[in-house]
Image (spheres, grey):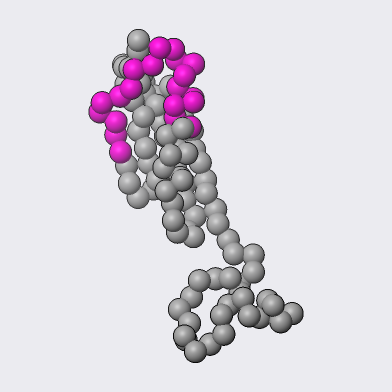
Amino acid sequence: MARYFSDFDDGNTKYVDAIGTELADVKMVPSEAIGFLLAIAKDVRDETDHSFVVNVRDDKGRTIFTTMLTLQSDWLDTRFIATARDPRSPPPDAAIRSE
């Protein structure tokens, strides 16, 4: 089995994989890299945009595969934006029910 190294970059954090993962076949590289990105993206809990990149290197240090995931989030109705509000004010959904 060959060893492959998945380096991660989100524009703020860079992680260089020094351990690697043994895979039975090079054809498994895309699935592993994309799965890695999805595992990271599922933990995003804010509304800012994110771009995640994984570059996969072989055991000779050559980058052989790259994948990128861009996560964009926008409120379509500003009434739903989570903001601090006065506890005496009506709940945010009160305006929706009255329309």
- Residue at the extreme right of the image, as rendered: 99
Q: Nearer the viewer, residue 60 or 8?
A: 8
In the figure, residue 78 lies in which quadrant?
A: bottom right
* Residue 53 in view here: no
Residue 79: image x %, image y %? Answer: 61, 74
Q: Residue at x 25, y 28 (%)?
A: 18
Viewport quadrant of the C terminus? bottom right
Please count the marks in the image. Answer: 0
Q: Residue furthest left?
A: 18
Q: Is residue 79 left or right of residue 25?
A: right
Asked whether the viewer can see residue 91, the reply is yes
Could you tell me residue 6's position as x and y percent?
A: 36, 29
Q: Residue furthest top?
A: 1
Out of 21 and 7, give the one closest to the viewer: 21
x 34%, y 17%: residue: 22
Q: Nearer the viewer, residue 1 or 89?
A: 89
Q: Quadrant of the N terminus?
A: top left
Where in the figure is residue 29, as x and y percent of width and height? Answer: 45, 22
When the figure is inspected, residue 64 is found, relative to residue 37, above or below; the finding is above
Does residue 86 sit above or below 56 in this rendering? below
> Which region of the structure is painted magenta?
15-34
Instruction: Give the quadrant of residue 36.
Output: top left
Magenta region includes residue 43: no
**Which residue shows up at 55% across the image and 57% down it?**
73
In the picture, measured across the screen, residue 74 lies left or right of residue 30, that is right
Q: Residue furthest bottom?
A: 88
The answer to whether residue 2 is above or below residue 29 is above
Q: Residue at x 40, y 12 (%)?
A: 24
Asked if the stretch drawn in magenta spans residue 16, the answer is yes
